[in-house]
Amino acid sequence: MEMLILVPKITNRLYYIFELLFKEELGIDFKFTIDKDVFLSYEGPKFHYDRMPWDEEPGLYQQSVKLLFERDIFDQDLKIFSYEESKAIYQVFNEKSILPFDIFAASFYIISRYEEYLPHVNDQYNRFQPKDSILYEMEMIEKPVINIWAKTLGEFITTRYPEINLKKKTFRFVPTYDIDAAWAYKNKGLFRTTSAFLRDMLRFEKKEIKERWEVLRNKKIDPFDTFDYQIELQKELKIKPLYFILCGDYNTNDKNISIRNKEFQQLIKHIGDYALVGIHPSFNSFLKKNVIKEEIQRLSEVLKREVTMSRQHFLRLSLPSSYQILIELDITDDYTMGYASQAGFRAGYADTFQFFDLENDMKTKLNIHPFALMDGTMRDYLDLDVHESYEKAKSLIDEVKNVNGTFILLWHNETLSGEKRWEGWITLYRKILDYILN
């Protein structure tokens, strides 16, 4: 059943967010009209979205603010207020409004990453910092607020129009791996290997020297070589992971194996036999279209197929430029949307959505897949131990399950070594998987 929505003006922003909330989240077909007579004569379900209501509202009414009827990007005067057991922005005050805040403007501001277009101070890696996010300020960054708000909107709609059947969503899990360094010791080349031995000797790292030597003599498996274990998990638990492989040239922050190495190529092909593989654009490729293009071509040539998935190394993302470059290079799906230093939902959403380019005022074809949790976030940024990390994971998983969203987990092959700084983390990973799947 189609809902007719009366608005004062139809804009790209307006259509984008209504399509996300009504169609994608709730499964409600709709069409807009700016004609009051058409709206009044319509016999189906009606929804009025405008600054002011009528004296007699024939359907549901939501009071609006200006955001969705603008085209330019302005600094927003955001005031956070308490709403039920949480908080919201873009408060409205008309008693006829079904919600005391403009759910459409609030959702658009967060999911479009509007705040990342405004002046802000990046971190040392040129990344937007979570502390500058409105969701962080609202203390809602670990909740998929847009999914939660959509659920509330659906309840209002079905109460007024019980004949409407909402979409029945189901929880989904997507495990992903970033391959920043396929091996700890193997296939590094003569110069890097010799340099590492000398460094360990100067530091009197006897255990490190012994382990490196045993691995290089094939007396011991390289600690980062956890790929057989990953395959075992996939078969046992019937999960379908995605892989993002670093193919950039060696650099201070790009330390994977050379793409020209035959064993590395064989590993990539092996992974590609049982999983989908995407590019992990290098640290050095940040905002460099030609460098990213070269890295995509390298991976494509090894796999003998087109590469259409991406996740930025170090999660370096600058909007809208990073996404505009990916679109130009025919990447269709990006998995970077998340923070390195903070768990939770950068875009306030636990499902796939299409990137809206605020600069050009248009919805693009680039699918954004936001992840909720990364191993390094818990270990390196939040300084959580194994038990605390498990509790953090459970909390986020529960949040996504409560809205039947998609939980994307970001892990690394070296974390599954269970050695040194990652002691106990292979067990943690299995516990997280079991909690998700059961």
Image: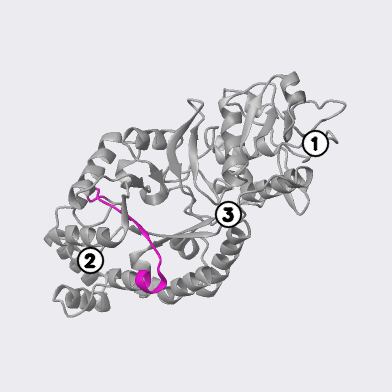
Closer to the camera: disc 2 or disc 3?
Answer: 3
Residue 218 visible from this viewpoint = yes
Boundaries of the magenta span: 233-251
- Chain-order first, disc 1 or disc 2: 1
Is 107 rendered above or below residue 67? below
Residue receiving disc 1 = 97
Residue 138 visible from this viewpoint = no
Residue, far right: 55
Please provide percent x and percent y for residue 313: 36, 50
Q: Is residue 80 left or right of residue 390?
A: right
Q: Amino acid at mark 1?
A: Ser
- Chain-order first, disc 2 or disc 3: 3
Closer to the camera: disc 1 or disc 2?
Answer: 1
Alpha carbons under labels 1 and 2: distance apart: 67 Å
Q: Amino acid at mark 3?
A: Lys
Q: Amino acid at mark 2?
A: Arg
Q: For the image shown, how many numbered marks are present on the structure?
A: 3
The label shown at residue 199 is 2
Callout 3: 10 Å neighbours few (<14), some, many (20+)? Answer: some
- Chain-order first, disc 3 or disc 1: 1
Task: Specify the quadrant of the image occupied by residue 308.
Answer: top left
Task: Specify the quadrant of the image occupied by residue 324.
Answer: top left
Q: Nearer the viewer, residue 51 or 260?
A: 51
Callout 1: 10 Å neighbours few (<14), some, many (20+)? Answer: many
Alpha carbons under labels 2 and 3: distance apart: 54 Å
x 66%, y 46%: residue: 150
Q: Nearer the viewer, residue 91 or 49?
A: 49
Alpha carbons under labels 3 and 1: distance apart: 27 Å
Residue receiving disc 3 = 169
Q: Is residue 321 left or right of residue 271?
A: right
Say if the magenta span includes residue 39: no
Callout 2: 10 Å neighbours few (<14), some, many (20+)? Answer: few
